[in-house]
Image (cartoon, rainbow, N blue to C red):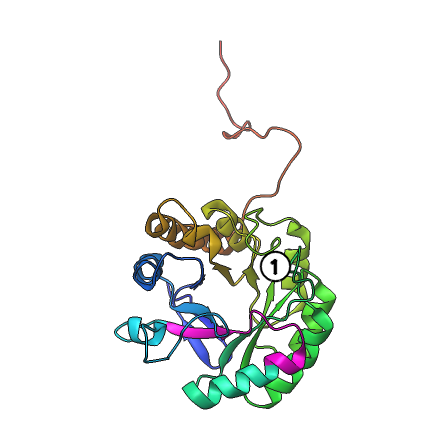
Amino acid sequence: MNDILHIGSYSFNSRLIVGSGKYKDFSATKEATLASGAEIITVAIRRVNIMDNKSENLLEVFKDTHIQFLPNSAGCVNAKEAITLFRLMREATNINFIKLEIIGDTQKTLYPDIIETLKATEILAKEGFCVLSYTNDDPIMAKRLEDAGASAVMPLAAPIGSGLGIQNRYNITFIKEAIKVPLIVDAGVGCASDASIAMELGADAVLTNTAIALADNPTLMAEAMKYAIKAGRLCYLAGRIPAKPYASASSPIEGKAKLV
């Protein structure tokens, strides 16, 4: 089935996006990423060595693959920091495909600062960046981010790294109805069924890192995520039956033969 994910001017066959943090080494990162079937890997450019040739770097590790890098601004706490970081990053790498992440509460919830995110989205989009904006699960803010130029909106499912799964399914469907750009569920995925549920609700893609990287077997979990995304997407496209409070016979009652 020809079911392509379009984000700005970019196109992808896989609807799973993976992270690069929390792995024991770059080799494990690469092995799990390839097993996931993902075509996008997000990288915290303030925390991970992308291109420093003095030591092992991720660009070198993935140079022989089809993986698209998605630099993110993890660690930034305001719009000014994120904008400066991405400008410098683009100058060094020529990458304009970015995940904007500005954290308001750095101590407990790691929730995004949506006001600063909105400011940065507008400026970066005007400068030609393809901005994927990380936000809370608010349909009003999702629409404002789209209007500000976001190429995709990335609402959290639950706090980063919590593994709690989608805490408010209704908000995901509300966001899907509110925007026309891709909805990518980000943060809080704990297992394959969480990813599948997100896709069944209508998400265009799912980003997960911790659930894979900290699994007992990251490569096996990555493969599980790959199939969960596909199953959830097919389920959404197929259209589920309405939920009913009572039983409904599988076989039709009309026209059945009478017993003598």
> Which x, y percent locates residue 98?
51, 77
Q: Is residue 150 above or below residue 240?
A: below
| Residue 142 part of the magenta-drawn span | no
Tell how many labels.
1
In the image, which residues are magenta?
Answer: 68-82
| Residue 80 part of the magenta-drawn span | yes
User: 230 or 137: which is nearer to us?
Assistant: 137
Q: Most extreme residue toward the left, as rendered?
A: 64
Q: Is residue 79 above or below residue 175?
A: below
Q: Is residue 178 left or right of residue 184?
A: right
Which quarter of the figure has residue 104?
bottom right
Whether residue 68 is visible, yes or no, is yes
The residue where tag 1 is placed is: 156
> Which x, y percent locates residue 188?
56, 53
Q: Is residue 111 left or right of residue 45?
A: right
Quarter of the image with the N terminus in it? bottom left
> Which x, y percent locates residue 180?
61, 72
- What is the three-letter code of the residue carrying label 1? Leu
Q: Is residue 16 left or right of residue 179?
A: left
Q: Residue at x 58, y 46 (%)?
A: 164
> Which x, y percent locates residue 249?
55, 28
Q: Secondary structure at mark 1?
A: loop
Q: Residue at x 70, y 68 (%)?
A: 113
Q: Is residue 56 left or right of residue 115?
A: left
User: 10 or 18: which is nearer to us?
Assistant: 18
Which quarter of the figure has residue 143?
bottom right
User: 195 or 93: which is nearer to us?
Assistant: 93
Q: Residue at x 49, y 52 (%)?
A: 195
Determine crowd level at label 1: few under 14, some 14-19, many 20+ residues with C-alpha closer than 10 A: many
Whether residue 149 is visible, yes or no, is no
Which quarter of the figure has residue 129?
bottom right
